[in-house]
Amino acid sequence: MRSTQPPAKLFDEGKPMPFVRPAWARTCREDDLRLRGHNTNREGAHMRTRSFLFLLSIGVFLFTGCSRTSSEQGAQGEQPKPPSAKANPVTLQVASQGASTVLDEEFKHVVQSFLEKKYPHITLNYNPESAGTSLDALLAAGTIPDLIVTFNGNLASYKEKELVSDMTPLFRTSNIDLNRFEPGYLNDVKNASDKGEMYGLPINVNYHAMYYNKDIFDKFGTTYPTDGMNWEQLIDLAKKVTRMDGGTQFRGLDPGSTIVWMSQPLSIAAIDPKTDIASVHNDKWNRVFKLAKSIYDIPGNGIITPTPKDQFMKSKTLAVLLDLNILTQLSAAGKEGLNWDVAQYPSYTEKPNTYGNASVYVMLATKTGKHRDEASKAIELITSEEVQLALSKKGRLSPLKSDQVKQALGADNPDLKGKRLPSIFKSIPVAYPVASPYRGKAESILINKFREFVNGSMDENTALGQAEEEINKMVATEKSK
């Protein structure tokens, strides 16, 4: 039967708990009494009881204390870690040369959105490619930009300006995997160095394509251009839509950058990169001059003042325009009433499904820039699959191998829906040639001589002969500076 008596008080209320020594803390006096025969059983039992109570009280105290600490931490939450030191803000100056169509507002917006998330301390300041902020103007003023965006054909000329160096060590530091890129585009960058160095990385690729105005072909009851056409077939088609109608002259075809793009599939150059001697007075260039002239010799299809792009997108009087990646511009023109589509670039009969150089746009950190580490981080970000995917969806061709990135081309642009974009990929670019640092100026001389030839001022042999002489004089002058 359970006792009804209240439990005995272990300690008097209000009095401090007496100190009780545990059994293991016996004194020498107690051991002495046991040895002398004293009865210590009763006393030992009493001591063991008091020891148990003492240990119990210690346990309660510890449990209560730990519980209180734990509950207090739970209420306050996890103690925050000391904040790590933030990176100092850095503004990178970005210059460009021949890349204004790449660094447009759409590109800047996409890059900025990713930059704010990953490297919020880095700001990119884009210098317009004009007046006092062009690359040449900045260099003349003694201002070295941190980053330069240009097409790979310009890289060789930067060596003499002390702007480039091998960025491979920086790419390793930034964990940039070069295997993600199409090897052909990387080789196009390496060609600028006689040592195979990487002066920068491709961030965008311009392909060659044929764009046509469907309304003009419909107007004159002519079939649209098709994939797989050679130059002669396209020229014959252009003749059918080159007409004067209602006081408006409609042109059938413009080859864009005239002889330069047309020459590239034949792997010929205006100047030998090894000797820096002109190499245009030959049969291959003669063929290109004649073929290009046959386009402008179509009655009503001669060279006129408005640019070919303006004729195609604004006045809408050009039936076929051969150009690079202009999808963004075409999207805007489509909203203004241009009914356009795209087909495979024409080719030479002996070189089917081949167009010219890919015009790889490269971003590089300058050799003497003050913020090379941060510049490398910016390049790493822009060439990442995430950023390249976002740019591809806008209609920009990526230098990456990724099928996901390629298949996403134009996906976010409703103006590109239904366009024959797969036609673009039916041709491949020729390998970019090793270029002379004087290539750009040499080609300018050649183009001017071609215009004189088209206008009837001279025949092709005279034009090519004079171009060769002027190119060699230009090189001699440049080398004497």
Image: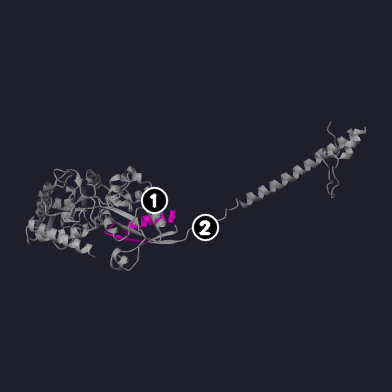
Mark 2 residue type: Ala
Residue shown at 20% from the left, 45% from the top = 354
Position of residue 441 measured from the top left corner of the image (x, y, whole percent): 20, 60
Helix, strand or loop under label 2: loop
Residue corresponding to mark 2: 85
Magenta stretch, residue numbers: 93-119
Q: For this view, does 13 lie left or right of residue 328? A: right
Whether the magenta-drawn stretch holds residue 106 is answered as yes
What is the spatial separation of the Cα atoms under label 1 and label 2, in whole angstroms?
Answer: 26 Å
Helix, strand or loop under label 1: helix
Front-most of 323 and 290? 290
Residue corresponding to mark 1: 169
Q: Residues within 10 Å of mark 2 (few under 14, many from 20)?
A: few
Q: For this view, does 453 lie left or right of residue 324? A: left
Q: For this view, does 247 lie left or right of residue 47? A: left
In the rendered image, is residue 301 in sight?
A: no
Quarter assignment of residue 258: bottom left
Q: Nearer the viewer, mark 1 or mark 2?
A: 1
Going by the picture, which residue comes out furthest to the top? 1
